[in-house]
Image (cartoon, rainbow, N blue to C red):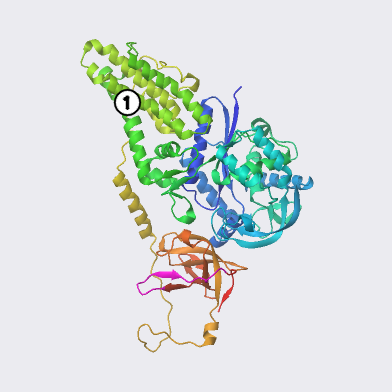
Amino acid sequence: MSKKYYITTAIAYTSGKPHIGNTYEIVLTDFLARFRRAQGCDVVFQTGTDEHGEKIELKAEAAGITPKKFVDGVAAEIKSIWDLMDTSYDKFIRTTDDYHEKEVQEIFEKLLAQGDIYKGAYKGWYCTPCESFWTESQLVDGKCPDCGREVKLAEEEAYFFRMSKYADKLMKYYDEHPDFIVPVSRKNEMVNNFLKPGLQDLCVSRTSFSWGIPVKSDPKHVVYVWLDALTNYITGLGYKCGGKSDARYKKYWPADVHVIGKDIVRFHTIYWPIFLMALGESLPKQVFGHPWLLQDGGKMSKSKGNVMYADDLVKFFGVDPVRYFLLSSMPFDNDGLIGWELVAETVNSDLANVYGNLASRTVAMSNKYFGGVVENKGVCEAVDEELKAVVTGAYAKVCKKVDEFRVADAVAEIMSIFRRANKYIDETAPWVLARDESKKDRLATVLYNLAESIVIGSSMLACCMPTLAGKVLAQFGATARPFDKLGEFGLLPDGTKVTDKPEILFARADVKEITEKVNAMYEERKSAAAPAPQAAPAAPAAEEKPEGVATLIDIAQFKEIKLKVGHILTAEKVEKADKLLKFTVGMGDEVRTIVSGIAKYYTPEEMVGKQVVVVANLRPAKLRGIESQGMLLCAVSADGDVVLVSPEKAVPAGSEVC
């Protein structure tokens, strides 16, 4: 009977299109799932989307659509990218799925009935983008300790989970399961930063927004993010709170590993285990908190405007080369880097020069010297044994690295087969052997050894590059070899014929050309987004005035203009309009959408969290199909530079300017 293996990603938040850093996680998890399947495990690989919360409610309102319609669109886009990247997930769960919502309600009621959840009131500092509450002492320079953005003081009735009740039990579990959190540095953070200082009770419901799962016994509350999102790992398997869980749940739970980003380790290694303890369920065996993929030395995020997307990379390099870069370049513990040139250079050095060159040379020589037929004549020398030792020893090394989640190191071990085989070509010089008829059997043996090495290495590399590694195997008349046979050398049958029409699978990327095309792509998008000229409203005839002289108004006219302080909640570029940014602006008791032509002077990431002055009683106007409900005040210098007008110091959003 196959060993079961249940592996999950974190569910992607449906606030927008996932960037390449988000995509790394699904590709990483896919590699692990494929590797376990190849080892003969009965694998269930689950991923999905997290679709509730205030941030989504605000984004949907700004877009003028319902939250459900908003998340339907984003979830479809996320799924399409996961599919584009050839990920082999078995289950895609959405937290808006009926069965999930129903089970979350039952879980909440169970925890409430047994006293783990109680009603109270929350007063604290709230970060809308992170959907997290913080105490005064947790703030960093008065801002959210996670994202660095502005926080607002919030107070509302809420339900709380008694986290402290389970703190000692969780610490004991850590001690008894030293490999529960990987890497160990993440475990140390949890113990030193959260468990030792003492766990605070966790807010698990909200009343200030409605886009969530209603609490069954108190419908004015909605279940707050983590109790909703984290339970996907069991509801997706058919967990039933009433005790009649599906056979699938009973077979595959507990999870063998949750693969998540390092920024959400706390939720998965403190909140999630405690929820499970309260439910009387087993804890996951491991949680792997992978590092971030950084661009130009900084964390990648849509709000910072430094985003690379998987589909753009695929257009230039193809799916498998992008997968290879992600899996070969991300360290185990420290953050990794990505850039267009880095990807191109990796494709050239590893795939074109090492792997592709080896395969094409071996196919070409087999066709040239033996009509494409591969045969082991058994004429061996000492150098053959050195090659065989590297090739047959690689699998055990790769397994050890995969068991430790050191995937980049595992890929490097696979590539060591091809590097050694290239060296073997230089050592044996087949072109020299071909000149001597008496060395023909030796030449055949050399080419057989090369073909066998390529088949063994490609069988493992197929977990990283399923399509291209499969094509290389096909060029040698083979399919991926069972992993339990990878320690044996010489299984390629004599008489196997290589392809006589080899396909160029790994063309070298021209770094300069790639850079120029990428720049052109972005410029083309900007040009296509240029706004159409806006017709100015007709103005009454007026006496001609010298340039720069303003019309005088009295105080009564000025009082007709309502100026208020707004707080930028979200910011994004307007599609097909390179001058426009669209903002969601909090103004005390209301949230407005405002479109402003300041994209030349401010990036979206600079705007989020700023306090601005808004003309609040301006007649709404449509810009690029978006209704703008106000105007941001700016100052314009003599040389045309534009600067936002902001309060000297922070004041409550909605404050009047007079």
Q: Amino acid at mark 1?
A: Asn
- Residue at 51% x, 88% y: name it: 554
Task: Reply above or below: 639 against 370.
Answer: below
Q: Residue 606 location in percent, x, y?
A: 47, 61
Q: Nearer the viewer, residue 624 or 183?
A: 183
Q: Position of residue 393 (x, y in %)?
A: 44, 21
Query: Percent x, y for residue 107?
Result: 72, 44
Residue 426 figure quarter: top left
The location of residue 433, given as percent across then percent down, is: 24, 16
The answer to whether 18 is drawn above or below residue 467 in the figure is: below
- Residue 549, by quadrant, is bottom left
Left or right: 286, with 536 as reference point? right
Q: Is residue 470 visible?
A: no
Span colored in magenta: 636-650
Let me know if residue 644 is in the magenta part: yes
For image coordinates 42% across by 28% down, the residue present is 414
Few, some or many residues within 10 Å of mark 1 (<14, 14–19, 20+)? many
Looking at the image, residue 180 sits to the left or right of residue 523; the answer is right
**In the image, residue 61 above or below residue 359:** below
Q: Does the segment drawn in magenta span residue 407?
A: no
Q: From this viewpoint, is residue 256 visible?
A: yes
Say which residue appears at 69% left-offset and 46% top-offset: 104
Taking the view exactly as shown, the residue that stands out farthest to the left is 435
Q: Quadrant of the N terminus?
A: top right
Q: Main secondary structure of the magenta part?
A: loop
**Residue that protrudes farthest toward the bottom in the picture:** 543
Is residue 192 left or right of 499 when viewed as pictured?
right
Q: Residue at x 51, y 41 (%)?
A: 25
**Helix, strand or loop for disc 1:** helix
Q: Which residue position is annotated with label 1?
A: 422
